[in-house]
Image (cartoon, rainbow, N blue to C red):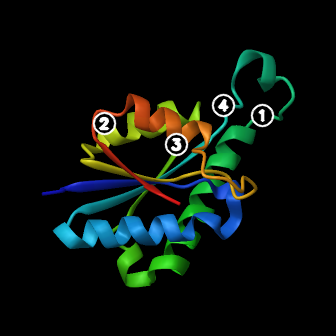
Amino acid sequence: MTKSVLCAIDLSNGDHDVPVLQQAARMADLDGAQLDVVTVLPDFGETWVSGFFEAGFHDKAVKEAHDRLVEMCESALGKERNSSVRHVVATGTAYQEILKAAEAAGSDLIVIGAHKPDIKDYLLGPNASRVIRHSNVSVYVVR
């Protein structure tokens, strides 16, 4: 029985990940599991990158990403369902942060999209592939 489902969303994909989110919600609902939704921002604070951004840029980017994530979840799942979703914005390398979020939440299942929308074949994207390879829990890939 699944107790916690983590859904990884890439906000830069626009609405492409809505079916991933909806599938994750269906899977969580089957077992009455907690649904957590995570998106990952690049680390703007890295030494070689941080000099290009104004002070406070990272905090502003995290807040905007959180607001967009909540908005996307509400639009895709409805206001009532979204009220029980935990929205997580992480910073760093996508696959590593997804795995960290899954471990922190005690997730039994990770739901992730297969690839970027511009890839027209059946290959997994690099982040989905790495999550699958390094995860200690089951990973469900939505194509």
Which residue lies under the disc numbered 2?
103
State which tag comes first along the sequence, 1 or 2: 1
Residue 74 percent location from the top left of the image? 50, 77
Which residue lies under the disc numbered 4?
43
The reply to whether discs 1 and 2 touch (Cβ–Cβ < 8 Å) is no
Q: Is residue 91 visible?
A: no
The reply to whether discs 2 and 3 touch (Cβ–Cβ < 8 Å) is no
State which tag comes first along the sequence, 3 or 4: 4
Say above or below: 101 vs 140. Answer: above
Circle 2 SS class: helix
**In this rendering, would 52 be left or right of 95?**
right
Tell me the kind of residue under disc 3.
Ala
Which residue lies under the disc numbered 3?
128
Tell me the kind of residue under disc 1.
Ala
Q: Which residue is the extreme one toward the top?
A: 47
State which tag comes first along the sequence, 1 or 3: 1
State which tag comes first along the sequence, 4 or 2: 4
**Label 1: how many Cα within 10 Å (few below 14, some 14–19, many 20+):** few
Circle 3 SS class: helix
State which tag comes first along the sequence, 4 or 1: 4
Q: Nearer the viewer, mark 1 or mark 3?
A: 3
Q: Nearer the viewer, mark 2 or mark 3?
A: 3
The Cα atoms of the two marked residues, 3 and 4, are separated by 19 Å
Tell me the kind of residue under disc 2.
Glu
- Quadrant location, the N terminus: bottom left
The Cα atoms of the two marked residues, 2 and 3, are separated by 16 Å
The Cα atoms of the two marked residues, 4 and 1, are separated by 14 Å
Which residue lies under the disc numbered 1?
55
The Cα atoms of the two marked residues, 1 and 3, are separated by 32 Å
